[in-house]
Amino acid sequence: MPFLTPAAAASLIESAVSTHSPLLGRSTHAQILKTLSTIPPFLSNHLIHMYSKLDLPNSAHLLLRLTSNRSVVTWTSLISGAVRNGHFSLSLSHFSSMCRDGVNPNDFTFPVAFKASGCLRLPVAGQQLHGLAIKDGQMVDAFVGCSAFDMYCKTGLRDDACKVFDEMPHRNLATWNACISNYVLDGRPGSAVSMFIEFRRNGGGGDAITFCAFLNACSDAEDLKLGRQLHGFVIQYGYEADVSVANGLIDFYGKCHEMGCFEVVFGGMSSRNDVSWSSMVAAYEQNDEQEEACLVFVKARTEGIEPTDYMVSSVLSACAGLAGLELGRSVHALAAKACVEKNVFVGSALVDMYGKCGSLEDCETAFHEMGERNSVTWNALLGGYAHQGHADMALALFQEMTCGIHEVGPNYVTLVCVLSACSRAGEVKMGMEIFESMRGRYGIEPGIEHYACVVDILARAGKVEEAYEFIRRMPVRPNVSVWGALLGACRVYGKPELGRVAAENLFELDPHDSGNHVLLSNMFAASGRWEDANLVRKEMKDVGIKKGVGCSWISVKNLVHVFQAKDTSHEMNSEIQKMLTKLKKDMKSAGYVPDTKQALYDLEEEEKETEVWYHSEKIALAFGLIALPPGIPIRITKNLRVCVDCHSAIKFISGIVGREIILRDNNRFHRFRDNQCSCRDYW
């Protein structure tokens, strides 16, 4: 290589940083040592800056020690590089060494040191830095003051943060943005809105960061009107073309359940980035439009958008809602290809997706392969165990989680999952003990979901009157889940009068839900009270309530096949009918008797006795037996609760055909194997 000048060397070092190439940086350093007798101070600063930015802290520190004239620029390069790469403790250690070296920090050094303290949540270190900044006269600088304010917000010292903000002689846009953003992060959207208004009164115009922070405040406060006003302001001042602001609007309207609005914003964007597509996927998923979320994800892929951790976790949640196991596996493969499957949020979404799609083995594998787990991860596996009837495994996992070895402790959702598992397992004593110890042992205040679980625990165990008394003593108003649990128990244990009480409360809370009316009618019919049953039906008709149409679907070779009761429209209908006839014959030989009486109080109640055999789940199962190879589990999803007769029939069929049949209805999973179901015949 020809002689290397200091200027050319500096240019090569900058290229190494911009291209993130340690090889180019080290090669350049070697040539500097080879061709230059002495290294100029500015070149040493460049090298230290390079090694710090490229996350080579040992090389950067070694070079600093070999540099005789260590200036504040040299030290600041080392400190900022450590902060940039997440070595916050190391950066504060370097700051201390700089001070011992007799070098005073400047207005570039203090902001990165404040950031390190804030990220480490070290208020004492931050206060010491603040005192040093005051002593050196640096607090008059807007960026130093903004960094100090941000540090106090992140370390939870609100009063100190307010004092710093009030004492700042000059507040730039970054200061106001930090103030508004930290109020949002602190869970105080009202204060964020007030600060934005004060900012406007002081003549501030705002930028993309300001508007996005304000939109977050509006979505957290569920203030659609105020967010719409900001949208108008954004259009008025010409910021609607800013991709970040448009992304913020999509997120805001998605969280406020305004589908038409976020679709219009997305459709009007002249340019979109990966955040735009991710926001759309998340917005559809948040609004229970799982199919649309998956379609947007597929379209994003056709547009060449690489999947991000946020996008993948959102589409996995959509797959979970659809019970789309094969689609979820495809997304899992894409996540692995994009190297985001190790992300804690993606990993948690995978555990949740596999659990909700009925693949417990994949759910456990995804959990155990995660290097980092948070509370969402643990709760996803707990929920998977509970909903698939493996209560003993759920309780064992809860014991493992609370034994003190793991850093993640139980939270509100954890206790909901565990109490639900106790309910499924009939563990009344254990469930009540866990509920009673929530405040004292776990520091968690029971919420309505926990009370609903306790009602379900008692009701499932046949203690229906005791469950009703528990409801009457509840310190919070019972919701749909509470009364629904009681009504379900009244169906199982034949308590029509108490069932009427539960149903009337459900009618008041959710007057348009046909399932509760049908269940009450069937309960009266089963006990021979036909007049009461007909009266409930008449009331449904008078107020215009229609029973939801039951349908079941099954995925075969990447195609979803949907069936309704008595469905004959499928192209393989003749084969399906032959399979149904064969199954009926084999089942009768095995001792099966159609449960037409109990079908009367099915939540779906596909009413006529002659139609019991042609319910949608039976048709879907017959198709699955034809279309899927032997030995492969058959997975069926139903939009309503499976009826009693179908549940009994599928148990028989699982033993006759020697197949595992997994049925997910609108209440839970039913895993049929060898004439048994995981729900223990209570659903």
Image: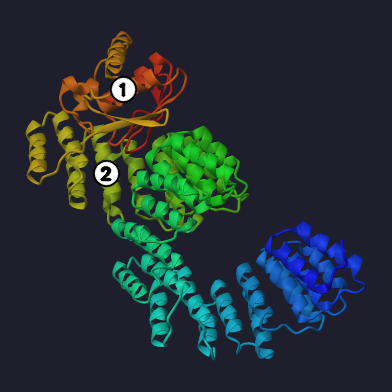
Number of the label disc, if any, that sits on residue 648:
1
Q: Amino acid at mark 1?
A: Ser
Instruction: Tell whether 502 sits left or right of 102.
Output: left
Residue 63 at x, y percent in the picture:
84, 69
Would residue 463 be found to the left or right of residue 245 on screen? left
Mark 1, mark 2: which one is toward the viewer? Answer: 1
**Residue positioned 35% across, 50% down in the render:** 451
Name which residue type carries label 2: Gly
Secondary structure under the numbered disc 2 in the rendered image: helix
- Where is residue 520 drawn, in percent x and y? 17, 38
Query: In the image, which disc is placed on residue 40?
Result: none
Residue 484 - label: 2
Q: Is residue 123 left or right of residue 296?
A: right
Viewport quadrant of the N terminus: bottom right
Left or right, residue 165 beside residue 88:
left
Q: Quadrant of residue 429?
A: top left
Which colour scheme appears in the figure? rainbow
Q: In this orientation, which residue lies closer to the viewer: 591 or 608?
A: 608
Quadrant position of residue 198: bottom left
- Is the residue under label 2 in contact with that under label 1 (CB below 8 Å)? no
Judge by depth and name the residue closer to the eye, 415 or 305. Answer: 305
> Which quadrant of the view contains residue 623?
top left
Whether residue 433 can be seen here: no
Q: Secondary structure at mark 1?
A: helix
